[in-house]
């Protein structure tokens, strides 16, 4: 009787997955867009591998998106300038409205500090229009 030869174990061949794809898969799982089981089937990656990537790469994702302090300060300064421009624009509109209509809405509806700033702008407008008309 012949004994059957043992066949060697079949070796799994794994696909190479780019680092960016790993991060996007982990982000989808962490954000709750897809489950780990669905990601495993969709991308052909074992759940154990996904769990390993999640453990190792979830911290990396946060570090890669973090800004340096100088960049953050620069962005915040730009935002402050933008908001100050918007505030000045709105105050100019209110001051123009008050100058044209003669009503003092800022005193009634705005905080005292803002009302004082608008009053100064309104007075400047009346001085300018008075000197232009003269």
Image (tube, rainbow, N blue to C red):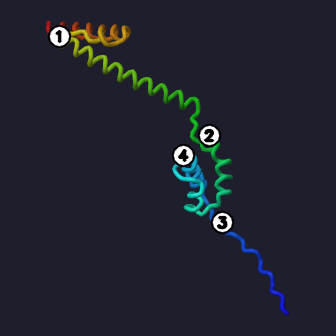
Measured as percent of width and height from the top left, residue 38 is found at 56, 58
Tell me the CA gap for discs 2 and 1: 59 Å
Tell me the CA gap for discs 3 and 2: 28 Å
Task: Give the answer, above or below, for where 123 lies relative to 23.
Answer: above
* Mark in front: 4 vs 1: 4
Q: Residues within 10 Å of mark 4 (few under 14, many from 20)?
A: few
Q: Which mark is residue 14?
A: 3
Q: Quadrant of the C terminus?
A: top left
Position of 108 with respect to 55 (left or right) is left
* Mark in front: 3 vs 2: 3
Q: Secondary structure at mark 1?
A: helix
Q: Residues within 10 Å of mark 1 (few under 14, many from 20)?
A: few
Mark closer to the chain start, 2 or 1? 2
Mark closer to the chain start, 4 or 1? 4
Measured as percent of width and height from the top left, residue 17 is found at 61, 59
Q: Quadrant of residue 68?
A: top right
Q: Which mark is residue 132?
A: 1
Q: Which residue is mark 4?
A: 31
* Mark in front: 2 vs 1: 2
Asked if the residues shown at circle 4 and circle 3 are in contact, with their CB atoms under 8 angstroms apart, the answer is no
Q: Secondary structure at mark 3?
A: loop
The residue closer to the viewer here, 75 or 87, is 87
Tell me the CA gap for discs 4 and 2: 17 Å
> How many numbered marks, from 0 up?
4
Q: Residue at x 38, y 9 (%)?
A: 113
Mark closer to the chain start, 3 or 1? 3
Mark closer to the chain start, 3 or 2? 3
Mark closer to the chain start, 4 or 3? 3
Q: Residue at x 18, y 13 (%)?
A: 100
Q: Which residue is mark 2?
A: 63
* Mark in front: 4 vs 3: 4
């Amino acid at each position: 009787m012949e004994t059957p030869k043992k066949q060697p174990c079949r070796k799994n061949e794994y696909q190479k997955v780019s680092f960016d794809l790993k991060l996007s898969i982990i982000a989808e799982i962490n954000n709750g867009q897809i489950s780990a089981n669905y990601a495993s089937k969709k991308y052909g990656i074992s759940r154990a591998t996904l769990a390993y990537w999640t453990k190792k790469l979830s911290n990396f994702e946060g570090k890669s998106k973090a800004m340096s302090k100088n960049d953050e300060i620069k962005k915040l300064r730009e935002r402050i300038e933008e908001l100050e421009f918007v505030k000045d624009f709105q105050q100019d509109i209110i001051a123009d409205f008050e100058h044209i209509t003669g009503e003092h809405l800022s005193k009634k509806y705005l905080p005292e500090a803002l009302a004082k700033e608008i009053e100064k702008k309104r007075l400047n407008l009346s001085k300018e229009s008075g000197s232009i008309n003269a």
